[in-house]
Image (cartoon, rainbow, N blue to C red):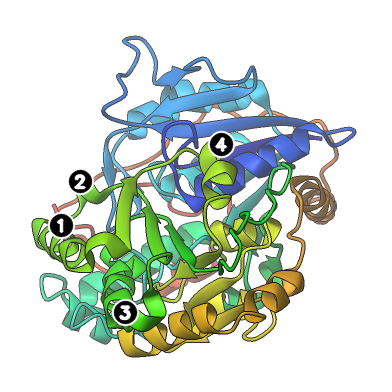
Amino acid sequence: MRVLIVSHGHPAFSIGGAEVASHALFRGLQAQSGVEAFYLARAASPLRRHEATPLMSLRQGPNEVFAHLDAYDHRWISSRALDELDGPIAEWLRELAPDVVHLHHLIGFGAEFLALIRRVLPKSAIVVTFHEYLSICLNHGQMVKTDRNRLCLRANPVDCAVCYPDWNVDAVWRREWFLKDHLQLADRFVSPSRFLVDRYVAWGLPETRFSVIENGLADTPAVPPRPLPKGGRRARFGFFGQVTEFKGLHVLLDAITRVPDTVWGEDASLAVFGGNLESQPEAFRTRFEALMARAGRRARFYGAYRSDELPRLMAQIDWVVMPSIWWENSPVVIQEAFHHRRPVICSDIGGMAEKVRHGVDGLHFRVGSAEDLADRLTEAMSDAALWKTLSAGCPEPLTAGACASAHVALYAETMAERGHLPAASVASAEGISSTQQDQPGPPARARQGRTARTARTGIGAGRPA
């Protein structure tokens, strides 16, 4: 079985949960008997493109390839680099002839990549893993309203147009059907959480195509608990992740200032490990810096980290805090924390509440409430037996090998449903048909019944110029 994993980024250049999860799956597949795995990651500026081709190796593994694709419309999840997709990348796909193409995100490649795969590799199985709600939600896939960051319980064109007044209801509707038209080309969808499945089923994707498979972790030794001095306590907290408003760092930084001095003492601290602060809006950066200054010696910001540094950083802390104000799905940092037996203190919503069991392997606090989080931090520092109890309750996360085995079983089942056995046959070299229009009408409902071979493969109906 030949499997191609497609990712919107490579963990060597872009630290994010989806990149780490997709690459761990790739490595896990490489160790599976009878499986030949390949990894295609998107590259973009500031990495420079080759003159002759968008395909590059960048000196990673022998089966790891990069596609330099800069032209991309993030809101529509749509590619503007159709010549690149239908040229060198299409030819590379034909030569590789994978039995399965498994996409983690459509970011960078665009929804049109699904149509290209289906045309170039008509017998191959297509699997898509969702890591957030990007297809559903215009607000960076967070399902958080732009008005005061209130949680969004459902998506519909009217509500979305309220969040984004520059989009009218018709434009939101056309985006939805553009994405659904292309997602229907996938044979199976994978989600690491049941919560995310429910959101996509409510949006309109068929539940029968979904499988819940947790992300697997690379097989690395767990670090032991931090040695405590005589009379010491478990009072070091750590944040790991992207430094964005949706990750709730403002809630955490506010919370630590609310813990009384008599509880915080001289030995407690918060270490913030996270990247991408420089790419955030100026208002967010200003607020973050002000909160860090207010926290004083209680918090330190260490900036971005590489995935291979995580065990060393985890060794320095006792608790992992996830104060996200959006639903999340299945954050890899939760798996990492459990692997190293670090209890997790998290918001009580979405994939976080599904993965972290209150009073068993972590603690929940009311989402967005600095007061409630301060109470949980106080509880963590004041109850001498709590950390030991919760640490012992941490489950052992799914390994990359076990995750890969579960995916191989899914691939085999999907290939059987398509009547396909390795190796894949090669399709004809028909071009991607696409004409970018200024104001085309909404997609006809008749298109819902079109087959995968005849589905629209262009930039997408209704896209604004």
As shown in the figure, which amino acid type bears the numbered disc 4? Asp
Residue 315 in sight in this render = yes
Amino acid type, mark 2: Glu
Badge nearest the viewer, 1 or 3: 3
Residue 207, above or below 39: below
* Distance in Å between CA atoms under marks 4 and 1: 27 Å
Looking at the rendered image, the disc whose residue lies closer to the viewer, 3 or 2, is: 3
Q: Which residue is mark 1?
A: 285
Tell me the quadrant of the picture where the N terminus can be found. top right
Disc assigned to residue 308: 4
Front label number (4 vs 3): 3
Earlier-in-chain disc, 4 versus 3: 3
Q: Which residue is mark 2?
A: 278
**Secondary structure type for disc 4:** helix
Q: Position of 419 compared to 276: left or right?
A: right
Q: Quadrant of residue 226?
A: bottom right
At x 40% / y 83%, what residue is drawn? 373
